[in-house]
Image (cartoon, rainbow, N blue to C red):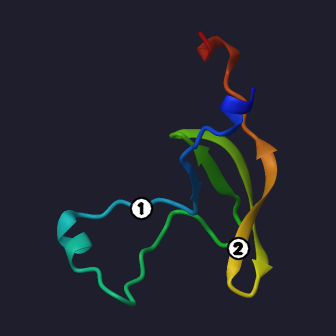
Amino acid sequence: MEAVMNVNLDVQVVLGECRMPISSLLKLGRGSVIELDQKIGEPVSLVINDRLVARGDLVKISEDRIGVSLTEIVLEHPASII
């Protein structure tokens, strides 16, 4: 069990998504704004190793840090587990 506890996972908090042509991407610079498909106050997604596992709300941890308060655990459909 101890060996499993030391395994690193890729954890991502997804604020939203957008699609843009490469030409627009290449024009981005400091101060550019990217419009996302999420609205302020909507839950963010917690993705671990490319798999959605939970949703939650952004919370302020300290003056310069934020975190995620989990509000929903996303369970896989039992038929997809083999």
Where's residue 4, x and y in %? 67, 30
Viewer-proximal residue, 5 or 20? 5
Percent of width and height locating residue 12: 56, 54
Answer with left or right where residue 9 lies relative to residue 63: left
Residue at (47% x, 59% y) in the render: 17
Which of the labelled discs sits on residue 18, or is there none?
A: 1
State the residue at coordinates (69%, 15%).
78
Q: Where does residue 25 sit, x and y in percent of width and height? A: 26, 71
Tell me what residue is drawn at x 67 percent, y 30 percent: 3
Query: Where 50 falls versus 30 (above or below)?
Result: above
Crowding at label 1, few (<14), some or many (≥20) Cα neighbours within 10 Å? few
Label 2 neighbour load within 10 Å: few <14, some 14-19, many 20+: few
Give whichever of 70, 43 is nearer the camera.
70
Total marks shown come to 2
Label 1, label 2: how far apart the Cα atoms are: 22 Å
Of the residues shown, which amino acid type is indicated by label 1? Cys
Q: Quadrant of the C terminus?
A: top right
Q: Position of residue 11 (x, y in %)?
A: 58, 50
* Image vertical order of residue 6 relative to residue 78, above or below: below
Q: Quadrant of the N terminus?
A: top right
Q: What residue is at 79 percent from the left and 53 percent from the top?
A: 70
Residue in front for this viewpoint, 82 or 20: 82
Q: Specify the quadrant of the image occupied by residue 21.
A: bottom left
The circle on residue 66 is 2
